[in-house]
Amino acid sequence: MGALLHMVLDTFLGKINWTWPWGEFGGPLTVVPASQSHWILSFLLHWTFLTEIVICAAALWLYLRRRRHP
């Protein structure tokens, strides 16, 4: 399940070819424009990074909640 979720999330910025072997589309759905002086800053200020932070925060919250209340 984790591997499939990883591939689904990588579809936005990565090159996941979901139509292989029938198709050749493998481009990202979203492109992070070079809006800052360094590419890392451009990525950190893009909306996709905020989405990843929210997902990680939700996973951490669930982990800590289940650990305290088994």
Image (cartoon, rainbow, N blue to C red):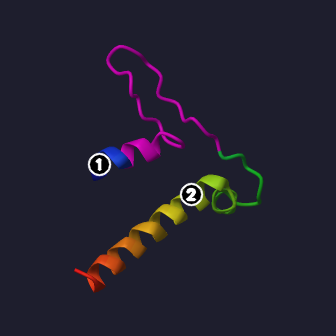
Q: Residue at x 34, y 21 (%)?
A: 20
Label 1 secondary element = helix
Give yes or no for residue 18 being in the magenta stretch: yes
Q: Residue at x 42, y 34 (%)?
A: 16
Q: Is residue 58 left or right of residue 69?
A: right
Seen from the viewer's position, the closer of residues 46 and 58 is: 58
The image quadrant that residue 43 belongs to is bottom right
Q: Which residue is mark 1?
A: 3
The amino acid at mark 1 is: Ala
Q: Position of residue 15 (x, y in %)?
A: 47, 36
Above or below, 34 relative to 31: below
Above or below, 65 relative to 48: below
Q: Which residue is mark 2?
A: 51
The amino acid at mark 2 is: Thr
Which mark is first along the chain, 1 or 2?
1
Seen from the viewer's position, the closer of residues 50 and 64 is: 64
What residue range appears in magenta? 6-31
Above or below, 68 relative to 42: below
Q: Which residue sits furthest top?
A: 22
Q: CA distance from mark 2 to mark 1?
A: 18 Å
Q: Position of residue 34 (x, y in %)?
A: 73, 49
Q: Is residue 63 left or right of residue 31?
A: left
Label 2 secondary element = helix
The image quadrant that residue 51 belongs to is bottom right
Give yes or no for residue 21 being in the magenta stretch: yes
